[in-house]
Amino acid sequence: MHNKSVAELSRELESGKISSVELTQQFLDRIKREDGKYNSFITVTGEQALSDARVADEQRAAGNATPWTGVPFAHKDIFCTNGVRTTCGSKMLENFVPPYDATVTANFRQAGAVCLGKTNMDEFAMGSSNENSYFGAVTNPWGLSQGNKRVPGGSSGGSAAAVSARLVPAATATDTGGSIRQPAALCGVTGLKPTYGRVSRYGMIAFASSLDQGGTIARSAEDNALMLNVMAGFDAKDSTSINREVPDYTATLNEPLKGLKIGLPKEYFSDQLSPAMEQQVRNAVNEYEKLGATVKEVSLPNAKLAIAAYYVIAPAEASANLSRFDGVRYGYRCEDPKDLMDLYTRSRAEGFGTEVKRRILVGTYALSAGYFDAYYLKAQKVRRLIQQDFINAFKEVDVLMSPTTPSPAFIQGEKTSDPVTMYLEDVFTIAINLAGVPAMSVPAGFVDGLPVGLQIIGDYFSEARLLNAAHQFQQVTDWHQREPQ
Amino acid sequence: MQWDIVIGLEIHVQLATKTKIFSGSSTAYGAEPNTQANAVDLAMPGTLPVPNEQAFRYAVMFGLAVNAEIERRSVFERKNYFYPDLPKGYQTTQLERPIVGPGYVDIDLPSGETKRVRIHHAHLEEDAGKSLHEDFHGMTGVDLNRAGTPLIEVVTEPDMNNAEEAVAFAKKLHGIVTSLGICDGDMSQGSMRFDVNISLKPKGSDTLGTRTETKNLNSFRFMEQAIAHEVERQMDILEDGGTIVQETRLYNGDRDESRSMRTKEEANDYRYFPCPDLLPVEIDDSFIEEARNSLPELPDARKARFMDQYGLNDYDAGLLAGDSRLAAFFEAAAKRGKDAKLASNWVQGEFSARLNAEEKTVAESPISGAQLGDLVVRIADNTISSAGAKKVFEALWSGENDSVDAIIDAKGLKQVSDTGALEAMVDEVLAGMPDQVTQYQNEEDPKKRKKMLGGFMGPLMKASKGQGNPKLFNEILVRKLGG
């Protein structure tokens, strides 16, 4: 059962071949048996899951089932879950149990899905390797057979690894600069970052509010569509969510791709990319041509400025977003504070990890009097130029395609000493967040036995088209079906 | 040396919305600590602000009332600093793009002149919670009921030149926001709080001096005292050849002392930047027109109406019209009492004095305007004397009885207005005071005569057991004594 997709499991449950309780128990057993190798879960909620599964079985028996009723999945530990601790990968929230659900959490609950637990992540979603988790690094299921512990990518490394290792068929994730797409690529699974505003951010612990977007990780495009059907939509609790009709994302998966206009941004096929990686991406594009698509080169002239702009804007927002973790109302508090300043400084010094502190400092600096114009305002100008690049590109083509990452999964510890090298992991993904457009990563081959991701970028609110393009590709390839050994 | 005083004000006005500016929690005052703070107010992880439309409507109404431009697109920013009563670690406020642009308010000065005070802007923001330093044994308690209460901060130009003008402006603003119904105006509960910026410059100089800011004054009286105190402090320093330090000061009204809170060098770098959780606020013409149509009568218009409708003079009309509750109280009294001038005198006299003495607001008055109107009726128709009226007022106030006529009956305050009976009493009293009668009749100075007339009133009131109509006694006396 663990190799089946959400769509398949849904059908199995509907046919009565298996109950949700049985299915849930199988996955829980598998997590217990296997996750020691990956550390992809921070919290496993076995009892709650079985209880939810019993309710789901009753609902299905009563004829009140949605496609998700009784289907197991997991939440990235950034989504608040009422009554279940939500750590965001941080010591700061090691014992934090929210008394409310994130809107995404509530939506899955409403749909009858069975949450098995909370997946590991870089602390406060800051990282590209999942080595910044207070709860330990996550190991990529790929590459273990070669004797190497490789990173799963980050920050949604736990979700990507868990799906890749068949511990859950699907997991929620979030993407601020590539945190869905990069781990999906490195773990050989399919991930979607929707348009900014498509999925509510309420109850999703903020890293950089203007860039954060909840999204999906599963093995197939179809399962991503099933997830997005549950997650997308306007939420009155999030002023930045957009009030726009939500289509049935599964309805258009089988549209033919004939005449689809694909653009290849020349800036994303530069010498940062190894020839082997480029070959895999070009092969994938060839498959699209066989499906009737046309291909042309386009330009995103300001894309090269994206990382610099991002590492001003994201830390600036984070520096304010993380001020609430002050040891006063909830979360970690230092022992025996001698006064208020001591309470603040030690709680934060002891509660946050190195990368989080680095970004708080960078952001605080960028917003300081005398530096604000040179950093924050300039970065916002760059952001507008990058948005315009994408708007211009989508006047010419329907989708853009590129590699998701410059290289496959690297070995743990390889890049931890140099933050800038680590930041370059997101060189092809970050501009998409600055622009706010949707993008996917789809498995598209292997280099040295490690998965390669194809990034497909679309215009605002074109998630249905992206999922359609990814699904059609997955009808003629089987990269997404490959299982790590 | 002669000095010019330059004063500008910043006024925090708590908006009387039912719920907070970014959450659904109640804003009602006086609840048990932390019972009106939800996950958003507590800044729990992942929670997000949702703007309260009513706060925007109130801000627009305020802008229209002070003749200001309404900004069609205003932006919320984050003002970053750490304090336990600031749960998010930043205050959501407006800086570069406030909702209310430049405007003005005209104030009446005691000299009878009118002065225009310009408003630089007014912006929307959220209030912080309260830190409670007592009763926690060396620790601090935090109450977040107030956190997220909507405020508008009104910032004036430095257009006032003495404490009187500043207080007149503050009272005028109080009258405007309470008339609009956007603020309950209860200063003792912090619904309006004043920060005063003061600087001195040599008389006639064009260059402004260094200013200080005295924060959080919550009564007109403290504001007046604080200004006097700070002007004197600055004058002493300047006349001794010293320089003023730009700083924020706290004034202790009970001790008439102030102390420095922080200097400019110690000021926080608030690292303002646009709040990414809130889109810019777009206000369209129809929203503004709706607000304009919902504007109630404002103090200036009400004053003109009081002069016209009730025949009040400029001063009385201005005083009564300035405070919406007092104005409504007066109108109820005047309508019931028929004699508007007499009603005005009683509202401004006995009634206001009593409120002040007991530190009550009009809303807390134990008597209604209609009841005062009933009293005015009985004074005007000579049923009771003014001395009797005071006794009736006392009985109403203390709640002995709520009917004016019942009190008059019960206390036997009805005046004797039977001319025959009164004449008999006058004859009798005059017969017993022949010397004073002669003295009176020989006096030629009308002023002195008038004063001497008073000498007969005491015995007359005594003879009538206090129930003789003094006005009639007076008429009879004048007639009998021969002019």
Image (cartoon, coloured by chain):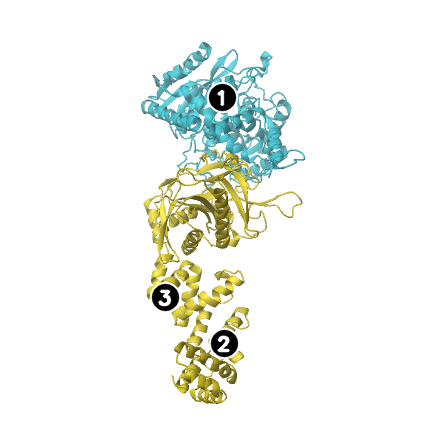
Chain colours: A cyan, B yellow
- Residue B423: where, in percent of width, then height? 44, 88
- The amino acid beneath tag 2 is Gly
SS assignment at label 1: helix
- Is B13 displayed left or right of B105 in the figure? right
> In front here: A301 or B481?
B481
Density class for disc 1 (Cα within 10 Å; few <14, some 14-19, many ≥20) is: many
Rendered residue at 39%/16% (across/down) = A267
- Find residue B312 and name its label: 3
Relative vertical location of residue B298 with respect to residue A477 in this rendering, above or below: below
- Find residue A182 and name its label: 1
CA gap, disc 3 to disc 1? 78 Å
> Contact, CB < 8 Å: mark 2 with mark 3?
no
SS assignment at label 3: loop
- Find residue B451 and name its label: none
Considering only order in the chain, which callout, 3 or 2, is on the residue closer to the N terminus? Answer: 3
- Find residue B388 and name its label: 2
> In front here: B221 or B438?
B438
> In front here: A255 or B439?
B439
Quadrant of the rendering where the N terminus of chain A is positioned = top right
Relative vertical location of residue B24 with respect to residue A120 in this rendering, above or below: below
Density class for disc 3 (Cα within 10 Å; few <14, some 14-19, many ≥20) is: some
User: What's the chain of the residue with tag 2?
Assistant: B
User: What's the chain of the residue with tag 3?
Assistant: B
Relative vertical location of residue A50 with respect to residue B315 in this rendering, above or below: above
Relative vertical location of residue B27 with respect to residue A250 in this rendering, above or below: below
Quadrant of the rendering where the C terminus of chain A is positioned = top right
- Residue A431: where, in percent of width, then height? 42, 23
